[in-house]
Amino acid sequence: MRLNVIIPLKGESLGASNTTIGIIMGAYLFTTMFFRPWAGRMIDKYGPIAILRIILVINGAALILYTFTGLEGYFIARMLQGVCTAFFSMALQLGIIDSLPDDERSQGISLYSLCASMPAVIGPLLALGLWQANDMSAFTVAMIAIAVLTGAAGYTAKIDKNDAVSAANPLGQQPTLLKSLGQLVANRHLFKCSLLMLTASLVFGAATTFIPLYAPQIKYGNAAVYLMIQAGMVVLVRFVWRKRMPSDGKWHSSFVITVMLILAAAAQSVSFSAWGGALFFYAGAGLMGVAQALLYPTLTTYLSFVLPQQNRNVLMGLFIAMADLGVSLGGVLMGPVADISSYSFMYMICAIICLFMLFFSKERR
């Protein structure tokens, strides 16, 4: 179920502004960003199964909140789901980095991201169909069913004690988070990758949040089709390109510049679709999916090689948090821009920001 489709539509039907909708949508990954650096420490302290069961209860409560509350409840539910995501994805990604050999690291990260993107291929169509049917009872049943199924799966999961130790995130042995925050600026590798990921994620967040509201303004535009094309390209490119992702610890300027140019072209194509029509709209979806598929695994793998070993996991957590922050800012910052101007102008601004980031894509020795 793609709540990213339903929440903006529901907000618009209740008379919410783009700014309000952006804040509600951004609350999810903003919360994830805040909790992500601490997730590994708590898993290490209490064990993965205990934490898993707690967050499944939280996730179930969040899903049920959607069924009987308004915008205020949606905001709380998004925050609760952000907490759950912080614990799940942080442990999984760092586990992949620590367990795979160097030359397979980018492939592992890419495949993990691929699996996380697969539900988005069909989810938007189901969500839009549910919304257009105007049957909230079906929505309620769907949310409760998802909460029960995920809860049942989590509470039947078991893990050996030895596995629990190895599965725990090693962040607990790292230097404190406050001591590592300064590295966001002091470490040039982390600064560059975080800035690029923050910017790209802002564009991704703007697409996720406002495409459901922008699509009706375009002839033959359909938000579900757009999001399915974008997610489908993410899955396809990450699968086809998984063995070609850079995994040598070197900065590939031309590759990163190409990806940022693709992202800028995607945002500009979506912007121009207000005049050019659905062809540009869906072309932008495909290009954005390509950029999304390539950038995150590339930067994550590069950092896993160049960051200092003694606090690598904490710094990786900060980098991933910057990606979360960017998606949140895509709603929070771009919502007012859309309110003041238009969706088309807002996506043009996204394209310009991507072009500006080309300056940081080059390796200066």
Image (cartoon, rainbow, N blue to C red):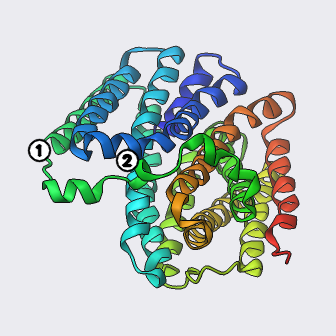
- At 59% from the left and 27% from the top, the residue drawn is 24
Residue 279's quadrant in the figure?
bottom right
Q: Quadrant of the C terminus?
A: bottom right
Q: CA distance from mark 2 to mark 1?
A: 17 Å
Which residue does the image show at 68% across and 64% down from the upper left?
283
Q: Do the numbered discs 2 and 1 sit on residues whose CB atoms are within 8 Å? A: no
Q: Nearer the viewer, residue 318 or 261?
A: 318
Q: Quadrant of residue 141?
A: top left
Residue 326, given in percent of the width and then of the height, sits at: 67, 45
* Residues packed near mark 2 inside 10 Å, few (<14), some (14 to 19) or many (20 plus): some
**In-image side of 283 versus 224 (left or right):** right
- Please, what is the three-letter code of the amino acid marked with disc 1? Thr
Q: Residue 69: where, in percent of width, then height?
A: 43, 14
Q: Secondary structure at mark 1?
A: loop
Q: What residue sits right under mark 2 in the picture?
A: 88
Residue 158 x %, y %: 13, 50
Q: Amino acid at mark 2?
A: Phe
Task: Give left or right: position of 310 versus 122.
Answer: right
Q: Position of residue 285 (x, y in %)?
A: 64, 59
The residue depicted at 62 percent of the width and 24 percent of the height is 12
Q: Quadrant of residue 206?
A: top right
From what the image shows, is residue 11 above or below residue 364?
A: above
Label 2 secondary element: helix
- Give the labeled residue for mark 1: 156
**Above or below, 341 relative to 235:** above
In the picture, which quadrant includes the N terminus?
top left
Q: Is residue 1 visible?
A: no
Front residue of this view, candidates 316 and 120: 316
